[in-house]
Amino acid sequence: MLRIEEHPILGSLKDARRVKLDYDGREIEGREGEPIAAALMAAGVRTFRYTKRFHQPRGIYCAIGRCTDCMMIVDGTPNVRTCVTPVKEGMKVETQLGYGK
Ligand code: FES
């Protein structure tokens, strides 16, 4: 698993509540309150969207909500910046193509 469980400054993640979310029809696990992007990265997901014109893959770049590379469709809403949007139980996250619909 690609997740830091013990951090020297931030402490332990072991007590964080585990939640389930749907990623393109696949169930993955996240920790309540962490960014959606963190849950996806821990599950091995690297491509979050494809560009409109050339269909090039995009994923995490800035991780602070500035670049828009991590935009996905979340619960039916396109263009959600997953690096700054917290995970919630049962949310549906979809890979975005172009501008989304
Ligand atoms: S990775 Fe840049 S806005 Fe999310």
Image (cartoon, rainbow, N blue to C red):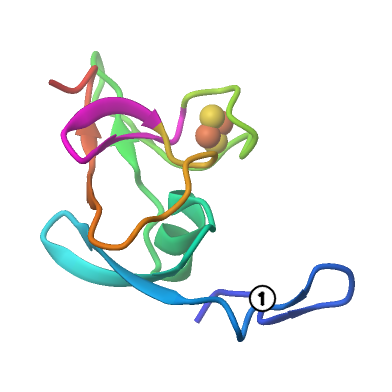
Q: Is residue 90 above or below residue 86?
A: below
Within 8 Å of ligand 1, the CB of disc 1? no
Taking depth in this image into account, of 67 and 84 the one nearest to the observer is: 84
Q: Residue at x 65, y 34 (%)?
A: 64
Taking depth in this image into account, of 81 and 97 the one nearest to the observer is: 81
Q: Is residue 97 above or below residue 2?
A: above
Q: Residue at x 89, y 69 (%)?
A: 9
10 Å neighbourhood of mark 1: few (<14), some, or many (≥20)? Answer: few
Residue indicated by mark 1: 4
For the image, the number of numbered tags is 1
- The stretch of residues the image draws in magenta is 69-80
The x and y percentages for residue 79 are 33, 24
Residue 27 lies in quadrant: bottom left
Residue 100 lies in quadrant: top left
Answer left or right for 14 relative to 42. right
Q: Is residue 69 above or below residue 75?
A: above
Q: What amino acid type should be assigned to the residue bearing mark 1?
A: Ile
| Ligand 1 quadrant assignment | top right
Q: Residue at x 36, y 71 (%)?
A: 19
Residue 7 lies in quadrant: bottom right
Taking depth in this image into account, of 78 and 86 the one nearest to the observer is: 86
The x and y percentages for residue 96 are 23, 33
Quadrant into which the C terminus falls: top left
The x and y percentages for residue 62 are 63, 34
Q: Residue at x 25, y 53 (%)?
A: 91
